[in-house]
Image (spheres, rainbow, N blue to C red):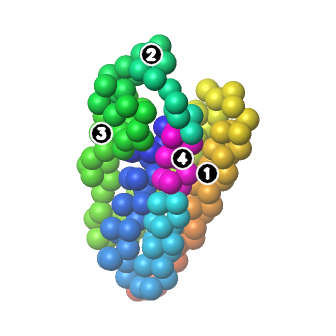
Amino acid sequence: MEYGGPDGELSASLRYLSQRFTMPDNKGKALLTDIGTEELAHLEIVGSIVGQLTDGEGARSFDKYGKGDYYVDHGNGVYAANAMGVPFTAAYFQVKADPIADLVENLAAEQKARATYDNILRLSDDPDVNEVIKFLREREVVHFQRFGELLNIYQEQIENCAK
């Protein structure tokens, strides 16, 4: 799910909270701080979903779904890994100290997260899970819009300096 993979909530929160230090003004720092901390809340939401869905599940049910190896290492614990079970790595995101490059990466990250939530919705038949996933998907769209607005401001500033 969207917990510890390259397009997951952990990657997003660490990306934004790391990039904020080199934003050129308080507006950029504030936006990255706000969205980065919201992504941490999303991490908690996703972890709660996974925890609730696997509560009481034993080894046989994990093995039935081809996740026996996961169970051997983690039981039914929530572990920061991608959908294939690869553990989280900071290599999933970049910090360039260039506001334009970082914001463009963030725009792409938000769209990849949205697409992953779309894929989860295609697979899930649980209405309660789907409502939460739809909420998280909506927030990714809002983040994309906010990053786009900030990118436009910074690009205009660059153009005005070049005149």
Q: In this view, does 131 lie above or below 161?
A: above
Q: Is residue 45 magenta?
A: yes
**Residue tagged by mark 2?**
60
Q: Mark 3 points at which residue?
A: 87
Residue density around tag 2, few if under 14, some if 14–19, many if 20 or more, within 10 Å? few
Which residue is located at x 51 percent, y 40 percent? Answer: 51
Q: Nearer the viewer, mark 3 or mark 4?
A: 4
Cα separation, mark 2 vs mark 4, equals 22 Å
Which residue is tagged 4?
A: 48
Q: Distance between the residues labelled 2 and 1?
A: 31 Å
Answer above or below: position of 108 versus 35. above
* 73 left or right of 126 in image: left
Between 15 and 98, the residue placed more toward the observer is 15
Q: Nearer the viewer, residue 16 or 43?
A: 43
Label 3: state its secondary structure: loop
Amino acid, disc 2: Arg
Tell me the kind of residue under disc 1.
Leu
Depth-wise, is mark 2 or mark 3 nearer the camera?
2
Q: Give the range drawn in magenta.
A: 42-51
Question: Looking at numbered disc 3 in the image, what kind of residue is underneath it?
Answer: Pro
First in sequence: mark 3 vs mark 4: 4
Q: Is mark 2 on a helix, strand or loop?
A: helix
In which quadrant of the rendered image does the C terminus lie? bottom left
Q: What is the spatial separation of the Cα atoms under label 2 and label 3, in whole angstroms?
A: 23 Å
- Marks 2 and 4, the one that precedes in the sequence: 4
- From the top left corner, tell me how far across and down residue 52 is, in percent: 57, 39
Please name whichever residue, 42 or 33, is drawn nearer the observer in this view of the structure: 42
Camera-near label (2 vs 4) is: 2
Residue 102 seen by the camera: yes
Seen at 33% across and 77% down, the residue is 21
Write down the residue under mark 1: 136
